[in-house]
Every structure is written in C-alpha cells, then in structure tokens.
Amino acid sequence: MTISLENDIIDTMKTIMIAFLVLCFTANVGNTNEKTTLNEKTTLNDISNEFIKQKNLLVAHISTVKEDTIEFQKKNWQDGKDQIARNINTIKSWFVKE
C-alpha cells in the first residue's frame, strides 16, 4: 500500500516539475528587446506599414505552400495511378494465362 502511494506522489511531482518547466520556458520565450508596445512615437503609418509587411509575408507563405502541395499531388497521384495499373495487371495475370 505504501509503495503505491509513493509511486503516486512521485508521478505527481514529475507532473508538477514538467508543468513548471513548461511555464518557465514559455515565460522566457516572449522576453525580447524588440519594440512590441505602442508608444507616443508609433504612428498610424508605422502600424499600417507593419500590417502590409505581415500581409505580404503571409501571401508569400501561402503561395509557396500551394505550389509545393500542387507538385506533391501531381507526383503522388501519378505514382498512385501507376501502382493501380500494376495491381490490375497482376490480378489479371492470375486469371488469364498468356
């Protein structure tokens, strides 16, 4: 009975330590010296330029992913068609003696 209780306590402590480490890591990830808050020197033009920059990055990323996906699908669909043709020929060869 005490061994089971000790194992439960150890498991709980492991869980708490993992949660603590995750919390510490995520808290430190956001600590940068970049300008992330609005202040009196930030203008609407700066904000507008940043939105445009982010939009352009997103559009470029989506275009790249789309092109990669199209190429991947072309290659794999053709491979799939070839495999189906081979399978059909193999099954036919079981029944038709040439």
Image (cartoon, helix red, strand yellow):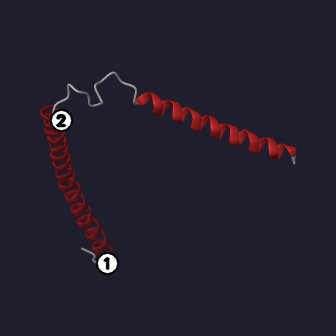
Tell me what residue is drawn at x 81 percent, y 45 percent. 5
Residue picked out by circle 2: 47
Residue 35 figure quarter: top left
Name, please, the residue furthest toward the front. 40
Say which element carries label 2.
helix
Residue picked out by circle 1: 95
Name, please, the residue furthest toward the bottom. 95
Tell me what residue is drawn at x 19 percent, y 47 percent. 62
**Picture layout, residue 47 above or below residue 1:** above
Q: Considering depth in this image, is 45 or 25 the residue closer to the camera?
A: 45
Q: Considering depth in this image, is 87 or 8 the residue closer to the camera?
A: 8
In the image, 83: left or right of 51? right
Residue 64 figure quarter: top left
**Picture layout, residue 74 above or below residue 63:** below
Q: Considering depth in this image, is 25 or 11 the residue closer to the camera?
A: 25
Instruction: Please name which of the two marks, 2 or 1, marks the residue nearer to the observer.
Output: 2
Label annotation for residue 40: none
Residue 84 figure quarter: bottom left
Tell me where residue 48 appears, x and y as whole percent: 14, 37
In the image, 75: left or right of 9? left
